[in-house]
Image: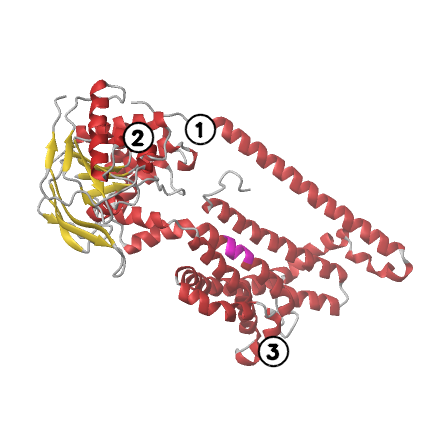
Amino acid sequence: MRTDVAARGPEGSAFARASSRGARHFVLGVLGVLVLGIVWQIGTWYLVSQPETRAFGNFGPIPTFQAFPRLWEQGRIQSAINASLVDRLATGLFIAALIGIPLGILVGRSKWFREISHSPFQFIRMISPLAWMPLAVLVFPGWNWAIVYLIVIAAVWPVTYATAAGLAKLEPAWYKVARNLGASRIQILKEIVLPAIAFDMFSGLRLALGVAWIVLVPAELLGVTSGLGYAIKDARETVDYSYLTAMVLTIGVIGFLLDSIFVALINRYSWYHRRTAS
Amino acid sequence: MGVRGVRMKIQGLTHRYGARSPLTFDQIDLEAQRGEFLAIIGRSGCGKSTLLHVIAGLLRPTSGTVHLDSELVEKPSPRWVMMFQAPHLFPWMRVTQNVGVGLRFAGWPQKRIDERVNEVLELVDLRDFANSNVQDLSGGQQQRVALARSLVMEPELLLLDEPFSALDAFTRADLQRDVRSIAKRLGISLIIVTHDIDEAVIMADRALIMVGAPGTIYKEELVINLPDPRQREDAAVQYMRKQLMTAFYDAAGSAPSAVGRGNGPEAEEAAPVRDKAGAAPTKRRIVPAA
């Protein structure tokens, strides 16, 4: 017996290549952040150099970083993150996934449902989530749930359509092979469908996170007395500029970290273009 | 490995895809002995692939029955597995996971799955690739994984739906020889559907011709009692091929000279079907002296 020979690369060199790519990735990332910091500092110097904006020096990076220990001690950052991230964002994204994934399976599998739902879904999707605010406040008990509703209505579409797109890429032959080997319906769902579309579901959730995060902060500028958006408003009203920029920075950092988590999940579950994923 | 073949009996098998579709094939009767290798030759669209799907239980017949030993085939089963034209591997699974997927469906414990998968990877000569990503494998290696995925179930009957047609000539020749020798060693029954006459001669113990629309099995069949291993260039193989080619053109109702060199599948595609041959129920059997 003979076996035709193809890609049999030594594992070691592949690992070395991957780690050198990781190092390069890291160095460039740090460099980018440094450039951003320098631009920020130059902007601050410019503000301070102008007579009419001299008072805004606290927007600069140095006062901002100095504000962090104070805010942390006061517990402001923790409570804002807890309110925004756990109570609202996580709850909203969870509900969006709970609705969006089955809805996506329905859109992906049923031609009838896809056609009947197209117009209403696209219509609702194009309404800015914030436009729902007055209505949501009337309908839901309390501001917190109103904000969760805004996040859900913004985040459900990317999840739905990414799931549907993932299903569209499933090869019908995979079902045939699985049935041929004795798989039950549940096993086909668990072993074939879900692993095949996990990548798309997480891509959808990543997009959903992006819009939810953007909706969250302005939504918290209204009504509520907790969260990152509220902290920004609070800082403006108390004219505490370093507090303000510290919260802006916090929003950016958390958003970035959350996005990285989803990128990691996407890479973990991606199986096509495997070697180009980064 | 203790695998045994199965006796197949097909009676009056008829199929159409929908109530208003034409018949795919009509009144097919067929028998095969335990451990026998059957080739069904026909051009594209004669219904041979559909016939195989019905035997595998993946499609329901419109009428008629398929019995494997005493069991009526009504649904797919790991006891009669099919290999398709494309490997259709699951790209998110490694080679071992792809091979073991049927055992996972059957609820085997992981340790026993690993042992069994290793045995079968050895058998199909893929042990060096156990942990590879299947997307990194060549077409021939991927079909070997698909073969292992079928063999791991210890099937009684292996159904091959032109599984080597997408491979290059050398890889195809290797796989034809290896699949025959492995299946013979395990004692499995085998049915291969192909439009490649060489492939039928190299792989089968008996070759049938399927012609017409709706498809029917032609009255002449060829017993291929050649020793193993069979090489394409052996005189006996060439002789057998010629016999089969002649029978094929008789079945299709046109002489080989009408299509020139009569040179394998390409030429066969060019030959027009003139009539529905095989209507006569009396079977003739050609048994050339090897």
Residue tagged 3: A134
Percent coordinates x, y for residue B150 in the rendering: 26, 39
Q: Is residue B187 above or below residue A137?
A: above
Q: Is residue B212 left or right of residue A42?
A: left
Q: Helix, strand, or loop for circle 3?
A: helix
Mark nearest the camera among 2 and 3 is 2
Do tags 3 and 1 sit on the same chain? yes
In three-dimensional space, the C-alpha distance between marks 2 and 3, rounded to whole angstroms, equals: 75 Å
Label 2 lies in what chain? B
Q: Amino acid at mark 1?
A: Ala
Q: Amino acid at mark 3?
A: Pro
Stretch of the chain drawn in magenta: A203-207
The quarter of the picture where the C terminus of chain A appears is top right
Q: Is residue B263 left or right of residue A208?
A: left
Residue tagged 1: A7
In three-dimensional space, the C-alpha distance between marks 3 and 1, rounded to whole angstroms, equals: 60 Å
- Nearest the eye: B53 or B16: B16
